[in-house]
Structure formats: C-alpha cells, structure tokens
Image (cartoon, rainbow, N blue to C red):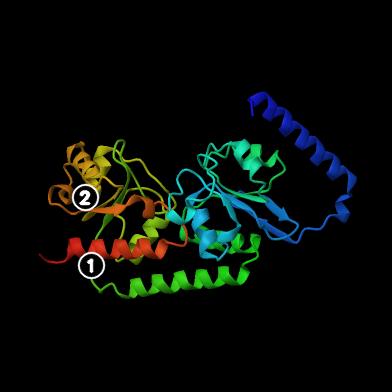
C-alpha cells in the first residue's frame, strides 16, 4: 500500500470511528476495564484485551508471565525469543509501522513512553486503538505495570501471584548475602560519554538486593541515569564495574580498558569487571529476580578472597 493510500485509509477509519462515537451517547457506552497508565491517562476497554501488540520486550515478557501469551499478536524486531518467531513483526518499538499495526487489528497496544514523551502513541491512538504507556524506572513501576497489564488482559489473580513470586525470590536472594561490608558497584549504561545507573533505577535496587551498593556519585536520590565527568568517575572508585554485553563480550571490555577515566579505575585495572547479559538486564519486567541472581553471583565471584 502506498503512503497516499495508507493516509486515505486511515482518514476513512477515523471518520467512521468519529461517526460511531457521535451515534452513541457517552452515557450509553460501557467500559468494563479502566486503568491509568504511567503518563496519567485512562485506558478504557469494553472487555479485557484479546489481541495485544507490545512495543517493548519487557511488556511482551510480562504478558507471557501472566499466562496471556495467546493475546500477543505482534512483536518488535527486538523480540527474538524462539517462541515469538511465528509472530509478525511491526518494526521497532519507537518507530513501528502503523500499517502493520492496523493490519493486525489489536484492541490494545503496549508502548514505551520516554521522559520526553512519545511520538508514536498519539499516532496509534488516532487509529482508534487504545495505548497503555509504560515508563519504567524502579521496581515500584515494574510491579505497577504487572498489576495493570493483568487488569487489561483479565488476569488480575495471575498478576498478584506473579508479583508475590518475584518479591519472594528477591527476598531469598537478599537473605543469601552474608553480613559485612557491601561492595560498591557501578553499572555502565554508556562508556563514552560515561553514563551509569543512578539511585532512582531498578538496577540500583537490584544491586542492593544482590549485596552491593552504588558508590557516591554526588547526585540526588532519584537521579536515574547520571552522566559522569572523568573526575567524578575516578572519585567514585567502585569495587566492581558491571558491564552489559551482548554476543561480543570481549569488545566492550577492551574498549573499557582503553577509555580515559575507565582505564584508570582500580576495578578495571585489577580485573573486577563483571560482564552481564545486556538483553536480560535491560528488561525491567518479571525477570528482575533473575537479574538480581546474576548480580549476586558476579559480586560474590569478584569480591571473594582469591
């Protein structure tokens, strides 16, 4: 379909939707499901969603963890798990194909909302498709997303059970940490420029569960991803550096060893750098207990006496 034809088709769809809305008085409409998303907007559905497109892997993972995997009718190019391979891709999470979304006839789209707002959400909503916007930073956000997605797909009990299970696993990991000094750990979000996980992130919380703590970065308690000058980076002097890596675990480590600031850190010079799977640690969803377990193992490995 050409762009001109797509524009015409979308215009007709919006016109029909507008006529339908005007034909039914607001008082006669029935909304069985109503939740508030992370940008404070009400998401209303006449019945629990049965056809869902999630534009972020953490949302897709959550739907499957809720036992609602059969509702997922589309994926993004970043959802590479084998059990999702049969699903059609709608493209990127921030720049999906509106034509592909429309063709799949979803009754709900789950989308990521950046701090600066979303460019794609209003476009999807103009198609008449409800959008549940997620803006996740800490674990409170994660539990809230599980609860509200559970409501949207009619899995409230499953959501409560999933949240309880995650909390129980995190408690068990925290209980396994021996008493004593808690090593400082710096989680690398970007090597150049240096950006790290700050106190306001789920990663900072999970480092705490795993027996570590963030070094003093000289930022506020709610700062999420602070950029660091070389001077602040050196002053932080962490015991451990946590480095997310993909299939190439050597390249990022070699780069860390070359970059000014990073290469001067004792943790880098003395080999206390823990490569952690980027695909796992970048998903603030039901897998956070697994993230904590990985961090717990790496902190223990690097800090135990040799």
Q: Is residue 35 above or below residue 103?
A: below
Residue extending farthest top: 4
Quarter that holds the N terminus: top right
Q: What percent of the width, then of the height, locates residue 281?
A: 37, 54
- Going by the picture, which residue comes out furthest to the left? 306
What's the residue at 50%, 73% (across, down)? Answer: 164
* Residue, disc 1: 181
Q: x, y percentage for residue 186?
A: 28, 52
- Residue drawn 15% across and 49% down? 266
Image coordinates of residue 118 in percent, x first then y, are: 57, 39
In the picture, residue 184 is in which quadrant?
Answer: bottom left
Residue 136 or 131: which is nearer the viewer?
131
Quadrant placement of the C terminus: bottom left
Asked if residue 212 can be seen in this view, the reply is no
Q: Element type at marker 1? A: loop
Task: Look at the numbered discs 2 and 1 and tell me whether their residues touch, using CB distance below 8 Å.
Answer: no
In the displayed structure image, the side of residue 143 where residue 71 appears, left or right? right
Decide: is 172 above or below 61: below
Query: Which is nearer the N-term, disc 2 or disc 1?
Result: 1
Judging by the rendered image, the residue that carries numbered circle 2 is: 237
Image position, residue 171 (x, y; %)? 39, 73
Determine whether the residue tagged by mark 2 lies in a helix, strand or loop: loop
Which residue is painted at 27% across and 56% down in the image?
185
> As rendered, which of 101 and 39 lies closer to the eye?
101
Q: How many marks?
A: 2
């Amino acid at each position: 379909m050409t762009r001109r034809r797509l524009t015409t088709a979308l215009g007709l769809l919006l016109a029909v939707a507008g006529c339908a809305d005007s034909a039914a008085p607001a008082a006669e409409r029935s909304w069985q499901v109503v939740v508030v998303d992370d940008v404070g907007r009400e998401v209303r559905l006449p019945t629990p969603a049965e056809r869902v497109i999630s534009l972020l892997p953490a949302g897709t993972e959550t739907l499957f963890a809720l036992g609602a995997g059969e509702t997922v009718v589309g994926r993004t190019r970043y959802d590479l798990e084998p059990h999702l391979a049969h699903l059609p891709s709608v493209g990127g999470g921030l720049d999906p194909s509106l034509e592909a979304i429309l063709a799949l006839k979803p009754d709900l789209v789950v989308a990521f909302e950046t701090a600066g707002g979303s460019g794609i959400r209003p476009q999807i909503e103009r198609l008449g498709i409800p959008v549940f916007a997620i803006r996740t930073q800490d674990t409170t956000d994660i539990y809230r997303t599980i609860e509200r997605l559970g409501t949207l797909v009619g899995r409230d009990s499953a959501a409560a059970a999933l949240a309880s299970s995650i909390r129980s696993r995190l408690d068990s990991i925290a209980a396994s940490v021996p008493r004593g000094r808690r090593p400082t750990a710096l989680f690398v979000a970007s090597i150049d420029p240096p950006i790290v996980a700050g106190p306001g992130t789920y990663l900072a919380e999970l480092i705490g569960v795993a027996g570590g703590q963030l070094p003093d970065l000289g930022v506020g308690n709610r700062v999420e991803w602070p950029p660091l000058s070389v001077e602040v980076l050196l002053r932080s002097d962490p015991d451990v550096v946590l480095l997310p890596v993909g299939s190439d675990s050597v390249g990022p480590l070699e780069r860390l060893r070359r970059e000014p600031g990073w290469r001067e850190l004792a943790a880098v010079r003395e080999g206390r750098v823990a490569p952690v799977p980027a695909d796992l640690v970048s998903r603030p969803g039901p897998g956070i207990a697994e993230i904590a377990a990985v961090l717990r193992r790496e902190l223990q490995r690097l800090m135990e006496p040799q």
